[in-house]
């Protein structure tokens, strides 16, 4: 049986916000679906090519304010991109990506057409931290370049990868930004402490970044990795430079994350740092 919803707002010829009897508000997208329609009218869900929920009041306001700045022909295309991302990641996307990524892509296209280049200083960190999201973002950028006849700078791949990661993990973009900035800071502390330069494209760097990411995740959930006092004492004697540096890193993490760090993190960090110094 077809289900009817009541039109709450016609955003343009192709987009309507409607009241759903079960899910509150839904966004209906379809070519010409809003043409000649008025608030209070009923419309069948089957008339839309695509629908998505919009339960957050703030996101609804953002979406409404965003519509006048987006070429109507692109609304369908951006929604196709979101479906593509969900399939490639093989995960349900958090609804906030509909607003956040639509906003980002629309203004990125405008920037590209005006020749404005945005540098992303954390591109290599993002690629190492979120390799699958980064690969999907590369594919999305290629789709946008073809469709919009623009050329996105490489930095946009990193920004889109962050949006994808946020949508599949339900982490806020501000938390994600904080984490990769912290990892970049920790890497610099390591390089200074061990007097070496880590190749940002090397396997060593990728392993380091993944280890630091897992440590940050453990700190966030307050995970205790066990008490290994004897091993800690042995590492302290065998590798004093790496052991002391591991505690320096822990203090940076405690300060930036404003959370306690389990002592056992020093063990794992020391072992990892020692691997870096042991390279031929």
Image (spheres, rainbow, N blue to C red):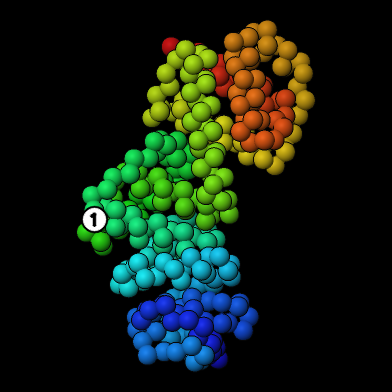
Q: Residue at x 56, y 65 (%)?
A: 58
Task: Report the front residue among 100 and 50.
Answer: 100
- Image quarter in which the C terminus is found: top left
Hey, which quadrant is residue 259 in on the image?
top right
| Residue 153 percent coordinates (x, y) | 29, 46
Residue sitting farthest toward the top: 237
In the rendered image, which residue does mark 1 sit on? 113
Looking at the image, how many numbered discs can be counted on the residues?
1
- Image quarter in which the N terminus is found: bottom right
Task: Report the front residue among 253 and 89.
Answer: 253
| Picture layout, residue 8 above or below residue 56 | below
**Can residue 177 be seen in this snapshot?**
yes
Q: Residue at x 53, y 65 (%)?
A: 59
Task: Report the front residue among 167 and 122.
Answer: 122
| Residue 211 percent coordinates (x, y) | 56, 31
Q: Residue at x 64, y 25 (%)?
A: 250
155 to the left or right of 227:
left
Mark 1 neighbour class, 10 Å CA radius: few under 14, some 14 to 19, many 20 or more: some
């Amino acid at each position: 049986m077809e289900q009817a919803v009541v039109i709450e707002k016609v955003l343009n010829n192709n987009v309507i916000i409607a009241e759903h009897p079960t899910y509150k508000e839904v966004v209906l997208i379809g070519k010409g679906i809003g043409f000649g329609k008025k608030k209070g009218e009923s419309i069948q869900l089957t008339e839309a090519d695509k629908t998505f929920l919009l339960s957050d009041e703030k996101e609804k306001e953002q979406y409404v304010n965003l519509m006048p700045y987006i070429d109507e022909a692109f609304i369908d295309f951006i929604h196709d991109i979101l479906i593509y991302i969900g399939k490639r990641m093989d995960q349900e996307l958090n609804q906030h990506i509909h607003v956040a990524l639509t906003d980002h892509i629309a203004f990125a296209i405008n920037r590209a057409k005006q020749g404005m280049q945005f540098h992303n200083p954390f591109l290599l960190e993002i690629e190492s931290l979120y390799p699958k999201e980064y690969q999907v973002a590369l594919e999305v950028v290629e789709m946008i370049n073809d469709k919009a006849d623009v050329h996105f700078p490489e930095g946009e791949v990193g920004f889109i990868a962050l949006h994808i990661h946020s949508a599949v993990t339900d982490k806020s973009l501000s938390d994600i930004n904080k984490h990769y900035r912290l990892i970049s800071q920790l890497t610099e502390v390591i390089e200074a402490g061990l007097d070496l330069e880590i190749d940002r494209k090397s396997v060593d760097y990728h392993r380091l970044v993944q280890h630091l990411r897992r440590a940050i995740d453990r700190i966030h959930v307050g995970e205790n990795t066990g008490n290994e006092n004897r091993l800690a004492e042995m590492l302290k004697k065998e590798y004093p430079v790496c052991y002391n540096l591991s505690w320096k890193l822990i203090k940076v993490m405690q300060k930036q994350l404003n959370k306690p760090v389990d002592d056992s993190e020093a063990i794992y960090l020391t072992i990892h740092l020692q691997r870096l110094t042991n390279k031929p």
